[in-house]
């Protein structure tokens, strides 16, 4: 697939998927600890930042960095594995580089 075939999710759908990913990560003990450790955030911070599109982009970056977690999330949510990647592209900082 080249960049011209790739379609990011629209912002609202991307934010919703980011929120779902955050909820899923928080529900996974091992991932939750790793996520909190990588952000330096506490539970109150998560609640405050859950509506921040840039933070949701970071949530998706975290999920996309672990293939087994990504596949488990997608299976549980009954979505295709490319959807979180497409959601990430629809949030701030998620633009694909143009190599042409």
Image (cartoon, rainbow, N blue to C red):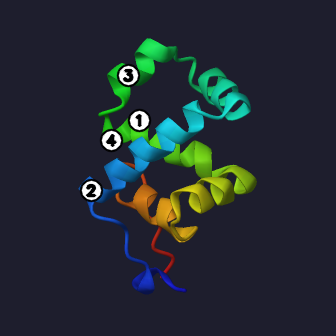
Q: Position of residue 40 (x, y in %)?
A: 57, 17
Which label lies toward us, 1 or 3?
Answer: 3
For marks 2 and 1 on the same chain, the one whose residue lies earlier in the sequence: 2
Marks 3/4 in contact by CB < 8 Å: the verdict is no
| Disc number placed over residue 53 in the picture, else none | 4
Q: Evaluate whether residue 91 shows in this view.
A: no
Marks 4/2 in contact by CB < 8 Å: the verdict is yes
Q: Secondary structure at mark 3?
A: helix
Q: Which residue is mark 3?
A: 47
Q: Which residue is mark 1?
A: 55
How far apart in space, not on screen, are marks 3 and 2 (Cα)? 20 Å
Q: Judge whether 60 appears above or below 32 on screen.
A: below
Q: Which residue is mark 2?
A: 11
Q: Position of residue 12 (x, y in %)?
A: 25, 54
Quarter-of-image position of residue 81? bottom right
How far apart in space, not on screen, are marks 4 and 1 (Cα)? 5 Å
Left or right of 70 in this view: 46: left
How far apart in space, not on screen, are marks 2 and 1 (Cα)? 13 Å
Q: Residue at x 35, y 55 (%)?
A: 14
Left or right of 69 in this view: 83: left
Q: 10 Å neighbourhood of mark 1: few (<14), some, or many (≥20)?
A: many
Q: Evaluate whether residue 42 shows in this view.
A: yes
Q: Judge whether 38 appears above or below 12 on screen.
A: above
Q: Secondary structure at mark 2?
A: helix
For marks 1 and 3 on the same chain, the one whose residue lies earlier in the sequence: 3
């Amino acid at each position: 697939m080249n960049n011209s075939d790739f379609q990011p999710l629209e912002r609202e759908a991307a934010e919703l998927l980011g929120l779902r990913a955050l909820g899923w990560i928080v529900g996974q003990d091992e991932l939750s600890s790793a996520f909190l450790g990588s952000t330096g955030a506490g539970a109150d911070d998560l609640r405050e930042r859950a509506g921040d599109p840039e933070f949701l982009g970071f949530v998706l970056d975290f999920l996309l960095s672990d293939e087994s977690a990504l596949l488990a999330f997608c299976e549980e949510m009954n979505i295709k594995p490319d959807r979180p990647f497409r959601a990430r592209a629809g949030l701030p900082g998620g633009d694909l580089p143009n190599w042409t």
